[in-house]
Amino acid sequence: MLRRSKISVIGTALGCVALPFIVQAQAGAGPTDPQIVGIVVTANKIDIDYAKLALSRSKNREVRGFAQQMVTDHSALQKSVEDLGAKLNVTPADSDTSKSLKSQSEQTTEKLNGLSGAAFDKAYIDNEVAYHQAVINAVSSVLLPNAQNAELKSALEGAAPLFQGHLKHAQNVQADLEGKK
């Protein structure tokens, strides 16, 4: 049985994979297990970077609390995903999806860096809500159908509550920000 942290790592690390996965799936080229692990590692690092940026730029207590949760979860989970890959003897593989994630991350970071105050807070949280919504769909429609290793598949299946929790937290912060207009 997988430890909760290994299940959680898959869940929280996938936040920004949705659009590239959907594009890749529509092209008929589903990801392999090494590519799935590579995407998870990439996505996890990206979310840590976004959260650290939010911690350095935001003065909003709720935004900072959400960002700190992302840093805490993803930092602990980054090691767990690497451990899971090692346990499964799966070396993370680069893919068009992981390359796309990196490119999108650079563009998003550039946009976020151009903002401050309430505009930054809104853009950061809106990005987090959108990507958590998209990943829930991507996991069920792309990752699970393509995962070949039973333990990897089980970790992906077990991550659904975590995805929902992060999405709900981000939506709550988003609603609070909208109420302060």
Image (cartoon, rainbow, N blue to C red):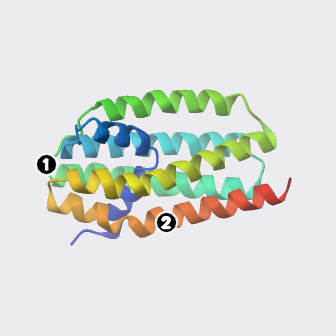
166 versus 46 height, above or below: below
Disc 1 to disc 2: CB gap under 8 Å: no
| Residue 38 seen anywhere in this rendered image of the structure | yes
- Residue at the image point whose x is 65% and y is 29% from the top: 111
35 versus 74 height, above or below: above
Query: Viewed as shown, does residue 103 lie left or right of 173?
Result: left
Q: Which residue position is annotated with label 1?
A: 89
Q: Label 1, label 2: how many angstroms apart (C-alpha)?
A: 29 Å
SS under mark 2: helix
| Quadrant of the rendered image containing residue 124 | top right
Badge 1, how many Cα within 10 Å: few under 14, some, many 20+? few
Q: Amino acid at mark 2?
A: Gln
| Residue 12 seen anywhere in this rendered image of the structure | no
Dot in front, 1 or 2: 2
- Residue at the image point whose x is 34% and y is 55% from the top: 139
Provide residue 148's location: percent of width, then percent of height.
Answer: 14, 54
Provide residue 63's location: percent of width, then percent of height.
Answer: 69, 54
Q: Which residue position is annotated with label 2?
A: 164
Q: Amino acid at mark 1?
A: Asn
SS under mark 1: loop
Of the numbered discs in the image, which one, if any, rests on residue 9? none
Q: Earlier in the sequence, mark 1 or mark 2?
A: 1
- Residue at the image point whose x is 23% and y is 42% from the top: 30
